């Protein structure tokens, strides 16, 4: 996916098993962020940055949805542990990850592996991608500030 592309309508199921659709956010901006794994240091820092600035994001018209390949059960525990106020999509079969280009080859401890590429899409009120943050560009502890600036 690239800037100017329309995001897919069906995003997936959240930690409660509810369908999450792009149209649920029509009229609001959506921060759709993809992260590798619940309860890892970088992913926790990123989620907590978005949590800590959630009110500011909402005041600016943003909603937030996180996505990883973790299970709904893992997401429930992660949300509870860190008091995350936004839904987390359990994309265990990588459908949305692949559709958005956030799944691919990466290097882990010197080995090439397939996995989630940390990526954030800022989607406008009409469902069109306005901005993309990816890989090392994302500062996990300051990610909300990156989006708001």
Image: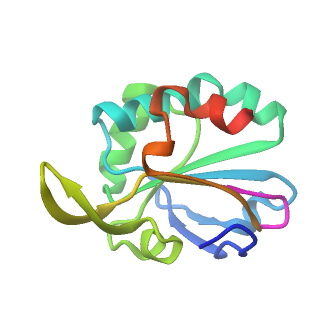
Whether residue 34 is visible to the viewer of this picture, yes or no, is no
Quarter containing the N terminus: bottom right
Residue closer to the observer: 67 or 146: 146
Residue closer to the observer: 137 or 79: 137
The number of numbered discs placed on residues in the rendered structure image is 0
Which portion, as a residue range, is magenta? 122-127
Which colouring convention does the figure follow? rainbow
Residue 103, quarter of the rendered image: bottom left
> Residue placed at 13% from the left, 48% from the top?
109
Can you name the residue that lies furthest to the top here? 52
Residue closer to the observer: 16 or 147: 147
At which x and y percent is residue 96?
Answer: 48, 71
Q: Is residue 124 magenta?
A: yes
> Residue placed at 50% from the left, 77% from the top?
99
> Residue placed at 36% from the left, 54% from the top?
72
Residue 59, quarter of the rendered image: top right
Q: Main structural element of the magenta stretch: helix, strand or loop?
A: loop
At which x and y percent is residue 74?
Answer: 30, 47
Residue closer to the observer: 59 or 107: 107
> Residue placed at 70% from the left, 67% from the top?
3
The answer to whether residue 116 is left or right of residue 138 is: left
Residue 9, quarter of the rendered image: bottom right
Note whether 117 is above or below 35 in the view shown. below
Whether residue 16 is visible to the viewer of this picture, yes or no, is yes
The answer to whether residue 57 is left or right of residue 102 is: right
Q: Is residue 118 magenta?
A: no
Quarter containing the C terminus: top right
Note whether 28 is above or below 54 in the view shown. below
Note whether 62 is above or below 52 in the view shown. below
At which x and y percent is residue 114?
Answer: 24, 68
At which x and y percent is residue 71?
Answer: 31, 57
């Amino acid at each position: 996916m690239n800037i100017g592309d329309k995001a897919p309508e069906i995003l997936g199921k959240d930690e409660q098993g509810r369908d999450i659709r792009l149209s649920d956010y029509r009229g609001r901006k959506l921060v759709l962020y993809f992260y590798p794994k619940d309860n890892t240091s970088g992913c926790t820092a990123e989620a907590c940055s978005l949590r800590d600035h959630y009110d500011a994001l909402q005041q600016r018209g943003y909603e937030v949805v996180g996505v990883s390949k973790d299970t709904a059960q893992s997401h429930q525990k992660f949300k509870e542990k860190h008091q995350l106020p936004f839904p987390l999509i359990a994309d265990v079969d990588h459908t949305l990850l692949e559709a958005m280009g956030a799944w691919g080859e990466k290097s882990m401890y010197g080995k090439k592996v397939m996995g989630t590429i940390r990526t954030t899409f800022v989607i406008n009120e009409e469902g069109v991608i306005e901005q993309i943050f990816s890989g090392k560009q994302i500062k996990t502890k300051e990610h909300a500030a990156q989006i708001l600036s």
